[in-house]
Image: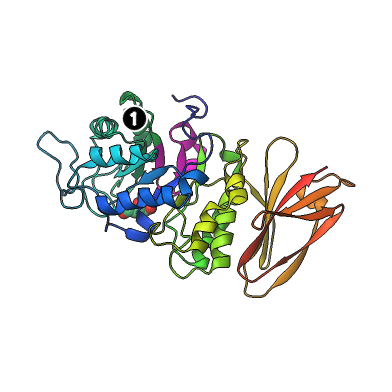
Amino acid sequence: MGIGRLSDGLALTPPMGWNSWNRFGVKIDERLVLETAEAMVSSGMREAGYRYVVIDDGWMAPKRDRSGDFVADPEKFPSGIKDLADRIHALDLRFGIYTDAGTKTCQDLPASLGYEFRDARRFAEWGVDYVKVDWCHTEGMGPRALYAKWAMALHAARRPIVLSICEWGRARPWEWAGRIGHLWRTCWDIQPEWSSILTILDRQAELHPYAGPDHWNDPDMLEVGNGELTSDQSRAHFALWSILAAPLMAGNDLRTMSDEVREILTAPEIVAIDQDAAGRQGRRVRHEGDVDIWIRTLGANGDCAIAVLNRGPVAREDHIVLEEIGVAPRTNVRVRDLWKRIDVGEVQRGIVIATSPNSATVLGLNPQ
Ligand code: GAL
């Protein structure tokens, strides 16, 4: 540990799964979590790549036990966390949990300061595969040292566990967290609103050099299917997160989601952008008025995905010269619509892209 990037192979592509927080807050219990895991299988999400079922803040009892170990809230999780993890594993899924690096969680429940090794050991005994470590109640502490301690504690627990660092991007974690954990939040909490998605997006534009296999920028969990986001806004959110090589942690109610929401979350050619094995995070090549153009290079032979994002309320048409996105002049480029999964033709010099209000057009470009 300490030299170079983490490379233990636990997150070669950005983690995919579900987390309870965005939709349920602290109102979680074992029934909800099991039903969600079952829905992940029956909806086809597991098949599409979603693996981790993560319980966020609110799972713990207000006090540790006499020996100092974490205890699950007995009303919410009467069968205990080990039993829950076993049942999730039986569905061929993985189980994730939450704690906080400070004296209390953000919801004022017991947290891990001074208990890192004990908690990591307990999580390992329970069969935890992923731990999100939050940053509330840490006054005066240095995130780098404290998260490094967490990495050591997980290492000592001798179970492969993904470490999700959640200090909201305050101490520029992209510069140091890749040596310690597999993903790190880059921003404050997302909200199920278009303005929140745009604000977060703007913070990611310069972060592409820092991500790669086993170390990912985390612009926060998905809001697809939550709040008042329209279907165009949800699609844009999902596609842009894929261009960003973001962890895809669904944050909606999987048990009751509409077909439309399910189709967004499982869209094969959009998920494939996110999970591209080369792991190169996309970047913004144009940011002008209401239009953004984002591009992500895929694989090894010059293929790429582009998203033209119309941030505003008016439909528009934008012209892109292929050189602007790094395609050599006089190259024939095959164009594919990655939502509709149809080839739309070949172009040579440039392309005109129509985008409805508050939406993103997402194309695959394949230079011949
Ligand atoms: C925040 C974190 C959220 C959620 C919440 C729980 O700090 O960013 O994602 O975990 O705490 O209280």
Judged from the image, the secondary structure of the residue bearing numbered disc 1 is: helix
| Residue drawn 48% across the image and 60% down it | 224
What segment is highlighted magenta in the picture? 163-186
Name the side, left or right, on which 247 lies relative to 327: left
Q: Please state which of residues 39 and 204 is positioned toward the viewer in this rendering.
A: 39
**Residue 311 image position (x, y, % from top left):** 62, 67
Q: Does residue 2 appear anywhere in the picture?
A: yes
**Residue 316 image position (x, y, % from top left):** 72, 71
Name, please, the residue furthest toward the front.
Answer: 42
Task: State which quadrant residue 191 falls in.
Answer: bottom left
| Residue drawn 61% across the image and 40% down it | 276
| Residue drawn 53% across the image and 69% down it | 230
Position of the C terminus by quadrant = top right
**As drawn, 324 above or below 118:** below
**Residue 54 image position (x, y, % from top left):** 36, 46
- Residue with the mark numbered 1: 154
Q: Does residue 142 appear anywhere in the picture?
A: no
Position of the N terminus by quadrant = top left
Judge whether residue 90 is colored magenta.
Answer: no
Number of numbered discs on residues: 1
